[in-house]
Image (tube, grey):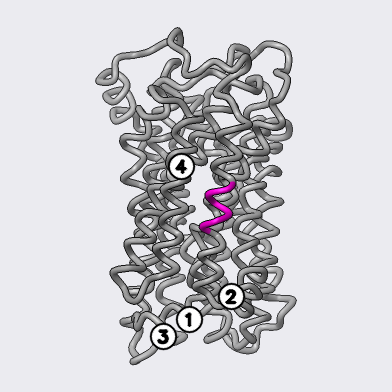
Amino acid sequence: MPGPAPREESPAPGRWRVLALASALFVISQFHRVASAVVAADLQRDLGLSSEALGGVSAAFFYAFAVAQVPLALFLDRVGAHRSMTLLSLVGAAGAAVFSAAEGWAGATAGRVLLGVGMAGNLMGTLKLLGHWFTAREFGTVAGLVAGLGTLGNIAATTPLALLAGALGWRRAFLLSAVVTGVLALAFWLLVRERPGGAGPPQDEERLPLGRMAATLLGSRDYWLISFGAFCRYGSFVAIQGLWAGPWLVEVAGVTPLAAANLLLLLNLATAAGAPLGGWLSDRVLDSRRRVVLLALAGTAIAEALMALSGEGRSLPALALLLAVFGATASFGQVVYVHVREVMPPGMPGMAMTGVNFFVMLGAAAFLHGMGWVLDRGGAATRSPAGFRAAFLAAAVAVALSFLGYLATRERRADPAGR
């Protein structure tokens, strides 16, 4: 799928409206990714789920999301981001409704699968749209801004969701999220266009043969190393941020559920600040995508190791600092999309970014499921501190290994035409 090179003309009127509405769909995608964390105890109780089953339900979103990246690479290019994001978001709204009505593992998993498919295009589609509406010199910073805005969805899935679920019950809270998702999809359809001037998917962009693009991507060492880094960094981060941080804070660190929700809120605020900061560092300070991603991998591995070694008695300020550093440094990793776009040949940035995103989502599913498996086998009938220690240390080791691999990646700055 050849993605558009970012524009080099004068700023397009209406581009901030496009950014705002596309980002709103990414916000709701981020919310749905991790919304099960705050209500994890309710889900286990009401649906009769083990830790491994709960991890599997949460992971179903990411498995479906990852698989959807394969056809999405062509779908976005042929149908256009505007139509694709609208249609898929409506599918996601239906998934949230199904999840809210679930009576057991099967219904909850079906809802999460629909949500994963429905939210699959909201980041890649947004980046494709921004390629039409923003210039090449703005692309890295704007991509970081989108990632930062998206974290508002993670924030909404912490204390606000906990309070809403407490007032309405988790089922009504998720049904409300289905309504919000559908309304945003319709607003996006009515108020956004594919490109300046209102034209649909362009027919005159450079199109490389699909087989040649696939062979180039799969034959690139950089692609595999970047993807492995993204798999481990995002996978372990979202498994902890989106599901296991809450239980760890309550069951190991010994904080109250409300304090845990507030700490998760802080984690997501740090993530929201770190994403645009990482984009700015890569554009303006370090002049490097690779160095910023290495910072993300190093910070993520160190934070996960420290969490593994932390237990009851750790003060709230210490926990807050640890989670803030974890969120801020891990979010620098969004620069991988710009990195892979720049190291691949002209004419295929869309396929390159979507190819990495496949491993991003696959990593989330694998770590959610895998950490649940470790926790169920931590040496006790219920989750134990030893189980959390083993799961978090395994995550830290995986990210550290991906850091070593990332050292071998190359870097090529984009030329003035955005290629």
Q: Residues within 10 Å of mark 4 (few under 14, many from 20)?
A: many
Q: Secondary structure at mark 4?
A: helix
Q: Quadrant of residue 31?
A: bottom right
Q: Which mark is residue 165?
A: 2
- Against 25, residue 374 (above or below) is below
Q: Main secondary structure of the magenta part?
A: helix
In the image, the segment drawn in magenta is 178-183
Residue 81 image point, x, y percent: 48, 30
Location of mark 4 (residue): 406
* Closer to the eye: label 3 or 4: 3
Which residue is under mark 1? 42
> CA gap, disc 2 to disc 3?
24 Å
Residue 389 drawn above or below residue 276: below
Q: Nearer the viewer, mark 3 or mark 1?
A: 1
Q: Mark 2 against mark 3, which lies toward the viewer?
A: 2
Q: Quick check: marks 2 and 1 in contact, CB under 8 Å? A: yes
In percent of width and height, residue 347 lies at 43, 16
Rendered image quadrant of residue 266: bottom right
The amino acid at mark 1 is Asp
**Mark on residue 383?**
3
Q: CA distance from mark 3 to mark 1?
A: 16 Å
Residue at image x 37%, y 71%? 102
- Disc with the residue nearer the chain's start (4 vs 2): 2
Q: Is residue 325 left or right of residue 215?
A: right
Amino acid on which disc 3 is placed: Arg
* Picture residue at 66% right of the left edge, 30% below the top: 287
Q: Amino acid at mark 4?
A: Tyr
**Tag nearer the camera, 2 or 1:** 2
Query: Which residue is outermost to the bottom?
Result: 381
Q: Is tag 3's residue or tag 1's residue first in the polypeptide sequence? A: 1
**Would you call the spot at circle 2 few (<14 residues within 10 Å), some (14-19), or many (20 or more)?**
some
